[in-house]
Amino acid sequence: MPRIFINYRRDDSSPYAGRIYDNLASHFGAPNIFMDIENLRPGDDFAEKLESSVASCDALLAIIGPQWLSAKDNQGLPRLSGQNDLVALEIAAALVRPGILVVPVLVNGASIPRDSDLPARIKDLSRRHALELNDRGFRQSLQTLIERINQHCSNPKSSSPGNETRNVEPREKRPEANPPGRTLAEDLYLLCANPKDGDIAFQVIQVGCFSFAQIADLVLLNRITLEMVDLPHGVRRVQSKMRDRTPTGDPLLDVSLESLRSAQPGEFPSPPQDDIIQRVRERLQGQGIVERKVRPRWLFSPVTYYPLISATTLNELRLQFASAIEASVDLSDRMAALAGIITITDPLDGVSASLWTRARDKAKRSRLGNSMVELTDQAWQAIVDDGASNFCNAS
């Protein structure tokens, strides 16, 4: 099975890198997809660890976004030219090995840099045929990439010294790949719904978590950005900013995107919560995960409910979530966002309270996950304040 190293700069292409990881992990298996140099222990030789990690792979994907080339360090110098820049070091380690396929992956409208703009150690990157990856044709382009990797690995590697692969232990990786095509709102539903009737926990409905799941997906697709803003009297708020108005191609997400287009910065207008939940149920029904049933009631209107057809998908997702929280590595932005949203409630029966404490802590390590924690906290506090106000007015 091919082993693939994903090279990226966090503040330039992290959402795309996470999405690529999820899809490749689903196809090749998570143990064969690597991101970042992990498990460094005190005293480890940094350069040797990097060399061995890259050398163990068959392909390196250099994810290039709009800020990849112009990124600056604390002194205002190009980060790519820095002696210890991880992005450049990883690419350079792959380029000197003929047996490693190096593919520049252009995301969010980026273009391949000219060799004159690159440091000497990675100039050869400009001569590698690049793959353009955008939201509209994401699956087709990714399939092209998968076929190219398989084609490369089907040919025997050269026996030249520069092409040898060192034997290294598999690095620990995030056990959290999600099936392609499922939105965060659908995963949220599966985690929080009662398997028997499809009812959702009270807190999740009240706080508008399904709307926040839509927002998180739009952030991952680079349609909007979120930032923390300090207001008077020590109040902090999460505000949104439109980044790309292009439709995602997903009907469920595009409804929320359309609402955000006309919004003021910081506002989160979205379709009614019940409408989102109903759309999610219909999508899961189309995937064969839930089924629609009608229960007659004497003297009352019939009740429609959506029980799970099989608990397999639900159990796999819940196990995946718990495993990701308990693992020693940080969460991907997608899983961190999901953790940040659902930690306001306890949708998993029988799960210890300590899991939710760890989930909240790990969600906060991700910028997107922390934004989701802040949004749910703000929404819940608004509900509490509104309830207190109504009580005072009534009295």
Image (cartoon, rainbow, N blue to C red):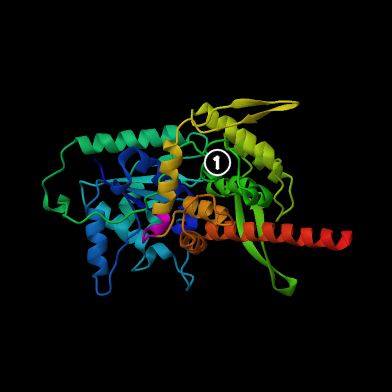
Q: Position of residue 41 (x, y in %)?
A: 28, 70
Q: Position of residue 75 (x, y in %)?
A: 47, 74
Residue 326 lies in magenta, yes or no? Answer: yes
Q: On the rendered image, what quadrant is the N terminus found in?
A: top left
Q: How many marks?
A: 1
Snapshot quadrant of residue 248? top right
Magenta stretch?
324-329
Q: Is residue 315 above or below residue 67?
A: above
Query: Which of 378/171 is in front?
Result: 378
Callout 1: few (<14), some (14-19), or many (20+) C-alpha neighbours within 10 Å? some
170 displayed left or right of 393: left
Q: Position of residue 161 (x, y in %)?
A: 11, 53
Query: Which of 240/132 is in front?
Result: 240
Q: Position of residue 271 (x, y in %)?
A: 70, 40
Residue at the front extreme? 298
Task: Write the residue at 24% across / 71% down.
Answer: 44
Query: Which of 27/78 is in front?
Result: 27
155 displayed left or right of 374: left
40 displayed left or right of 168: right
Residue 167 visible to the viewer: yes
Residue 190 lies in magenta, yes or no? Answer: no
Three-letter amino acid code at disc 1?
A: Asn
The secondary structure type at the circle numbered 1 is loop
Q: On the rendered image, what quadrant is the C terminus found in?
A: bottom right
Residue 113 visible to the viewer: no
Query: Can you identify the residue that label 1 sits on?
Result: 194
